[in-house]
Image (tube, rainbow, N blue to C red):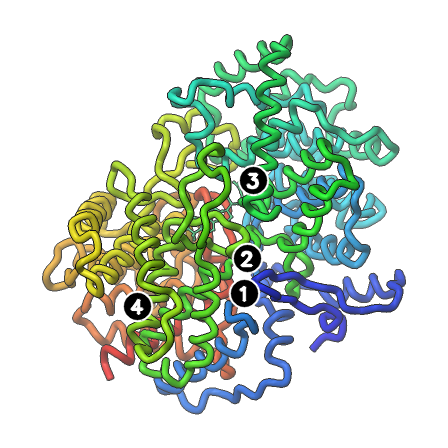
Amino acid sequence: MNSFWKDWALLTHKDRQIWRFTKQDAISDAYLKDAAIAFDFNKHVNPNAADLVYRNAKLEGQDIGERKSNSVEDALQQAIYFYSAIQTEDGHWTGDYGGPLFLLPGLIVASVVTDTPLPSVHQRLIAQYIFNQQNKDGGWGLHIEDRSTVFGTVMNYVALRFLGFDLSDERMQLAHTWIQQTGGATGIPSWGKFYLSLLNVYAWEGNNTLLPELWLLPKGLPIHPWRYWCHTRMVYLSMSYCYAHRIQIAESELVHAIRKEIYTTPYNQINWTKAKDEVNALDVYHKASSILNVFNAFANFYERFPIQRWRKKALDFVSTYIDAEDEQTNYINIGPVNQVVNSIAVWHKYGKESEQFQKHVERWYDYLWLAEDGLKMNGYNGSQLWDTAFAVQAFCESDMAHSFLPSIENAYSFIDDSQIKTEVRDFNTYFRHASVGGWPFSTRDHSWPITDCTAEGLLASMAVHSTFPELERKVSYERMCQAVDLILSFQNEDNGWASYELSRGPKWLEVLNPAAVFADIMIDYSYVECSSSCIQALHVFHQHYPEYKTNQVKNAIETGLRFLLSKQREDGSWIGSWAVCFTYGTWFALESLTKQGYTYASSKSVKGACDFLVAKVKEDGGWGESFESCVRKEYIQHGTSQCVNTAWALLSLMAADYPNKQLIDKGIQLLIQRQVRNGDWPQEAISGVFNFNCMITYTSYRNVFPIWALARYMRKYN
Ligand code: LAN
C-alpha cells in the first residue's frame, strides 16, 4: 500500500470515525508535496473513488483468501468474508460518504472566518481532493459526477485561494477562465452568496433577507419555520444568525485579489440589488417562484428599517435554538451544512476560546473522510447504523449466517448501542419529534432519529432474533415496542412516512424554496422508501408479537400499503428519492408488498412493477440507471449496467416470484462476473441522492446489495 496512505489511521472509538494523521515528525513542505502526489486520482476514468485507503488498511494482515469457483455459493461466501473483514472493531460498517462538492468549501469558510486553520497536511489533502475532482473544462459541479456549475466552481475556486493556491497554478487559471467566461460570481445561487459574504468577497446587501423574525410568527401560520423540513430549518436558523449580524472577515490583499478574479465587473461597480436575484441558468434546478420574489421584496423592504425590539427577540431565540441543537447532537449537528454554520455563530457569540466553539471544531473532523482521491467532507457524520442494519439483514437472509456469527454478534451490539434510549432535552421547545426507541442514520450521539433508520434498526434486530434464537436478546421486547410506538407516531395523514418528522406544512410551501439547486426541501414529504421500511418493520413485528397494539399496528400497515399503491406510476415503477432511482424505489415498494403475500401471479401491481424492471434490463443481463434518472424523474439508462441497480432489480424480482428464472440467473451471473476475486465488487457509478439534484456516495452498497441478492437466490432456488 502507498506509504503516504499509511500515515493515516481511522479511529472508530465508540462509533465515532475520525481520520488521524499518525506521523509524529515535523511536516516539511517536501512531505506535503509528495503526499499530494500520493493522492493523485484520475476522475476522468471514474470520479468515484473505491475507498481503498480504508479498505486496504483494514485488510492488511488478514488472510481472507480468494473465491474458490464461479458458483453462487462460493461467490456469496467470499463476498461475506470480504465484507466482514472490513467491519470496524466496534461492529459497524463504515465508508466514504462524500459526493457533494459544496461541503468542503463550507468548512473552509468556517475555518477562515473563525481563524482556525486545519493542520497543514489536512489542508494539503483537501486541496488535492478539490483538484482531483475538477472537471476537464476547469470547473466543478454540485457533486462529483455533475457538469460544472457556478456554485461548484466559484466555491471550490475560492476555497483553493484560501488554501494558498493562486493563478500561478494552471488548474487555477483554468477555473478562473471558466468563471470569467460564465459570467462571474454574481450568478451564484443563494447559498453561495451567503458563504462569499462571510468571506467579504460578496456584499451582504446582495443577499435576500434571511429573516430571523419568521420565528416570531404565530405557530399556526403555514410559513412558520417549525413546519419546514428539519434540514432546511436548521440550515436557515444559523444562516439567519450570521446574516443578521453581517459577519464577515476583514479586508485583506487576498480578499481584494479574489474580488478581482471572480467577477466580470470591478467590485465597486457591481449592482448588488440586481445581484440578489441573479442565478446563472446553469445552476437553476428549482426556479424561484413569483411568490418568493414578492416575499423577498417585502422582507428586503423591512430589512431597511428592522424593528429593533423584534430583531433582538428573534435573534435571542435563534441563538438559544442553535445552542440547543449543539447540545442535543453533541455538537455534531443534524448535517454538514449547519455544523459549520453553527460553528461560525457560536464563535461569534461565545468567542474563539470558548468551550462551545472548541467542541464544534472537534466535530469538524467527524465529517472528514480520507480516500484515494484525498480528504473530503462526508454528507453526514457517517452512515454507520444504516450500513450496519442492511449488512445484518443481508447476512441473515443466507444460511451461511451461522458461519459468520462473531461478525453478526458484533454488529448486533452496535445496533443495540445505537438505539436512542433517553429523550432529547427540550425537544418540544425546539420543535423536535420524540426520539426514544428510534435509530439514527449514523450514531447515537447524533441523536436525530429517522423513520426508516428506526425501521431498519428494528428489522435488523428482529432478523438476528429469529436467525439466532439462542443469542442473548439485547434489544428487548420493551425497546422494540418503543421503536414501534415511534414508527406509529411518525405516520402522516396521507398514510405515508416522511424522513425525520411528520409532514408539518402544506406542499405549496415549496414556492418559498430559495435554494435554486435543490428541489423539495421545504417540508418533509412522505417517501416511498421511508414508508416501505416502516411498513415492513411493523409487519414483521406484528408476525412475532400480534398482541401488541394489534389494531393500531394492523391499521398502520393497511393504510401504509394504500399509500404505497397510490404512489405507483402508470408504468409500474416507483421513483426513489434517496438513491438512483427507479430500481431503488421499486425495490423498496416491492419488499413491502411481497411481504404481505402479493406476488407476480396474484397482484396486478406487483406484476406491473416486475414488467417495468424487465423492460429495462440490459443486453448483458444487468440493470444500470444513470443519476440523471433522479434529476429528470424518468428512467435514464446508464451506459453500462451497475451491480447495485442489478442487485435491487434482482431482489425485487425474486421477492415477487417472477416466473422467468433464466432472467434472474443471467443477472446473478453478471454479479458473479463483476466480483473481484477477493470478494469485493468494483466501485461503479454514484448511487445516492438527495433533493433530486445532488448525488451522494454509498460505498457499502456495492457489497451489501449484491450479497443480499446472492443470499436470496441461494435460499430461493437451492
Ligand atoms: C440523508 C442520508 C440518509 C437518508 C436516508 C435514511 C437513506 C433516507 O431514507 C431518508 C433521508 C436521509 C435521512 C437523508 C436526508 C438528506 C441528507 C441528510 C442525507 C442524504 C445525507 C445528507 C443530506 C443533507 C440534506 C445534506 C446537506 C444539504 C442540505 C440541502 C441541507
**Which residue is the site of mark 2?**
382
Dot 3 or dot 1: first in sequence order is 1
* Image position of 661 (left or right of 109): left
Q: Nearer the viewer, residue 182 or 262?
A: 262
At x 32%, y 67%, the residue is: 462
Q: CA distance from mark 4 to mark 1?
A: 25 Å
Alpha-carbon distance for marks 3 and 1?
25 Å
Q: Which quadrant is the N terminus positioned in? A: bottom right
Label 1, secondary structure: give it: loop
Decide if residue 428 is in sight here: yes
Disc 2 secondary structure class: loop
Question: What residue is shown with label 4?
Answer: 650
The foreground one among 226 and 476 is 476
The alpha-carbon separation of the residues under discs 4 and 3 comes to 41 Å
- Mark 3 vs mark 1: give the one in front: 3
Give residue 218's quadrant in the image.
top left
Q: Nearer the viewer, mark 4 or mark 3?
A: 3
Mark 3 lies within 8 Å of ligand 1 (Cβ measured): no
Q: Disc 1, disc 2: CB below 8 Å?
A: yes
Measured from the top left, where is residue 450 in percent x and y? 41, 49
Amino acid found under the numbered disc labelled 2: Gly
Where is the C terminus found, in terms of image quarters? bottom left
Residue position for label 1: 94
Q: Earlier in the sequence, mark 1 or mark 2?
A: 1
